[in-house]
Structure formats: C-alpha cells, structure tokens
Amino acid sequence: MTTATPEIPAGKRACPAFIDAARVEWKLGSYGITVGSALRDVDPWLRTQDYRRMVAARMQPLDPTQVRSHLPAGEYILSRKYDGEFTVLLFREGEACCVNPGGTVRIGLPWLAEAAQRLRGAGIKSALIAGELYFAAGPGVRERVTEVSRAARKPASQDDLDRLHFVAFDLIESDGAAPPARYADVMARLQKWLGGGQRVGAVATTLVKSEGEIEAQFARYVSTEGGEGLVLRSDSAGRFKLKPRHNLDAVVIGFTAASEPDRRGMLHDLLLALRRADGSLHVLGHVGTGFSDEERRSLLSDCNDRLVASDYSEPSDHHVAYQMVRPELVVEISYLDVVTQSTRGAGIDRMTLSWDATAGRYSPLRRLPLASLISPVFIRRREDKACNDSDVRLAQLSDRFDISKTEVNARQLTLPKSAILRREVYTKTLKGQTLVRKLLLWQTNKADSGDFPAYVLHLTDFSPTRKTPLERQIRVSSSREQIDLLWAELFEQNIVKGWTRAG
C-alpha cells in the first residue's frame, strides 16, 4: 500500500553537516539530492571514482561456457550480482549519505538512516562502503536498474523510497584505515556491521572450490531464479563477472575490409546501429568476431554493393574510417554485458544519424546516451528482418538497461541557451593607444548533451601595438568552483597595475 508523505518545511529537513544544505534539491519528504562538489570534503567522491575505475579494470567478464576454459583453478568467494546502481555509502560524524561516480549525492533515504544507526551501534566513526543501490520489487521479482533510476530520480511516493535498498560488497575505508587484505575478512566486517538489516545488508557469499560448484550456483541464481549473474573473487586469481549472453538484432550501416595480405577480399568488421522511435539511427558500435571466412567474403561483397555517401565519419579501432552502406542488412549479435557510464560516471554518448534514402546519404544529428557492448559476437544474418521500428528497435537495450533520453526526438531536440555569469572589461592607455582585456564567463546549460562543458571562461586580449593584436585564452570546467578559481588565476596574471575597469 502506498504511504502518503507529509510535506516537510525546508528549514526542518535534516542534512548531514558535511554537505552544503543550500545546494540540496529536495525531491520528496526528507529525500534530497545534490552534487559531489556540495560535499565539504570532496575526497569521498574522488575515491568513489577511483574505486570504480580500479574495479572496472580488474573485473573480467565471462559467460558460463568459459568457466572451464578461462577461469583459473582455485577457491573463489561467490556472490550474486544485483541489477542496480553502483554507489558508495559515506558515513561520517554519525550521519550517512551515498555518492556515485557521476557525483550524485543522495540523503534522507530510509536505508541511509538504518545504515547510520547500525554503524553507530558498531562503534564506527567513519566509513566508505561500496555496494549496490537496488529496488526491492517484492518476493520472487528480480530487481531492475531501470526501477532504481525511476524511483531515485522522480519518486512517486514514500513506498518508492522505502523500496530502495543497499547491499554492501566491499570496504574502501573505515575509521581512516585501509580494509583487510583478505576479502573474506572484509566480508566478515560488513556482515557484522550491516548483515540482517531491513533495507541494508552485506551481500551473501559462498566459498566454491570447483568449476562444477560454480556452474551449479549459476544454474540456481541465474538460470532458475532469473538473477543477473554472479561475481567471483579470489585474493590470488582476481575478480570475474559471470553473466549469460544476450542477443539483439541491429542494422549494418558501415564496414571495413581486412588489410592483411592473406585476408584480402574479406570483411574486417561491421558498424551497427539501432533505430530510435523518431526514425533516426543510433550508432551502437562494431562487431568483428564470430564470422566464418565465407561469411566475411559474402558480407564484404554485399556491403560493397550498398556503398553510400555520408556527412558523418566514424573511425574504426584500427584507425580506418568506416565505409557507410544503405541501412538494409540486419544481423543478430550476442553480447555479454553493456557499459552505460564511464568509470567517472559520465554517460556513453553516441551519434544519431538521419538517413535520406532519396539522396543516399547519412547526416549527423547529435550525440545521445546509449551504451558500449562488452564482447559482441556475430551470430547470423537475419534475412527475415529489416530496418524498421520493430526489428532493430532501441528498446532491445533500453528495456533491459538504464539508458536516458530514449524518448526524445533527436531530429527536434534543441539545446538550451547559454547564460552569461560574469563579464568584466579593462582598458589601459600606452603610447596613445588603447589596450583592452575582457574576461567573460558563461554557463553553457548544455553539459548533459555530452558535447559541451558546463562552464567556459574566455579572455580577450587586444593590443594594437603587438604583431598579433588580438589574442585569446579559453578555460573550461564542469565545476563552478573550479571555473571561479580559473577566473581568479587569469585575473591575477593579466589585470595588473595600470589597468582600469571600464563601465
């Protein structure tokens, strides 16, 4: 049953002392969000990014067929993989918030209050705990990251907030000390502090010693119960992510040919796209494995028969531009996983294209969020499918993963106008000539597009006595605090004795 949430006056909402309360955007009741730079000490946010980058570099993806061939022999601590949002629990001064690599800071969630109570009870003074924020949909219903995004961004009721849970799987720091070296000891601490909670807990682990045990656990958690996958950790062998492969159909929009002498006349790889609801084609990425030699020959021939012009150029991994083709060939591929964010939390933006069948030409529209496929493999050609709203639809990914702006029209989307924040002009007279230096700072309001920085600082330096009278300097930043520091730096370097502010 949905629980009504009484309105809380802004002055009575609780905010941890280590966060600038004036920068919190209140969403529902006592739940609010802000940005990483609103932390009075941004080190926890930076460490969250570093941890995510380190884990991403060390975590190796595998599918079930590779357990016996690619997984080093040994003992592993096995846990189920939650389909949620990676986040870090920050506990300090008896209060808690959570922060993700992109810099989204959340406060006032019920699970945060529970986590703070448990850590205080355990005598902990400060901690950084890595885990997964997930949406508890109910008994027998698997969690989905899309539900986390919906409930966390625009909660409809208190029930949405109550269903946001946190499961810890690693310890970054506690009371200023590094975690134990052995992962088993790390999990023992997390179980002691958080285990058995209502909305917080530590991930359940099992020690496995053979491929057969791993395969049995995969069959139980994933094949039977519909879980997302498993995580295997070993202090000596490393970390592995075990997930089933997924299939999708995509349209071929480009190709490159093999350059090796013994592979002439063969395809190297295909450039693929998915169709958005507005009819534009969203560049997905490329696939270069899974082909037989005969398939490489026939696909290269068919692609050469469909060559078209394009105002957009996409470089391949071997630094050769893809040759673009009419969007007619549909192929089925499999993939192990997708990445929707960089290790620093930025979105994976890819170009959307307009296809003019009459002119036989592609035109770029703009970049929009999509994903990067992990381990894509060619399966087969789909002669029974075409480039339409059903067969190669974007929803094949967006229904499964959290991809933003899938509903927007790439053809009509207009970017907001920039706003000038500061403008100062200074003059100086030298030998009868007027010198001018102008500092201009503006907010682009287009940072979400991925094509623009959040802030731009421009210095114009005009001196008619110089060989190059007009010189410019540009600084950009995603942080207002940083761009203000850059303004002060340019001011100190360029507005020295003798310069007078105009107007």
Image (cartoon, rainbow, N blue to C red):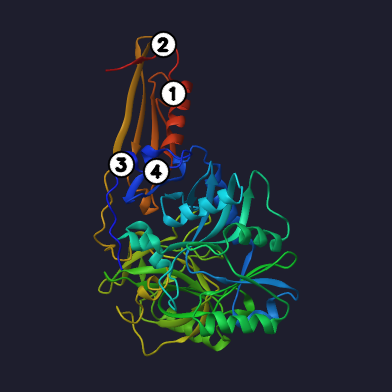
**Residue 107, x across and y down, in percent:** 42, 49
Q: Is residue 485 left or right of residue 160?
A: right
Q: Which residue is found at the position 34% from the left and 36% from the top?
A: 442
* 502 over 274 or under it: above or below: above
Task: Give the mark, 4 or 2, whose residue is nearer the N terminus.
Answer: 4
Q: CA distance from mark 2 to mark 3?
A: 48 Å
325 and 87: which one is in front?
87
Q: Residue at x 73, y 60 (%)?
A: 182
**Mark sitting on residue 14:** 4
Three-letter residue code for mark 4: Ala
Given residues 175 and 480, the one toward you in this image is 175
Residue at mark 1: 491
Name the image quarter holding residue 143.
bottom left
**Residue 9: quarter of image:** top left
The crowd level at tag 2 (other Cα within 10 Å; few <14, some 14-19, many 20+) is few
Q: Nearer the viewer, mark 1 or mark 4?
A: 4
Q: Residue at x 48, y 22 (%)?
A: 493
Residue beneath disc 3:
10
Instruction: Find residue 439 and name its label.
Output: none
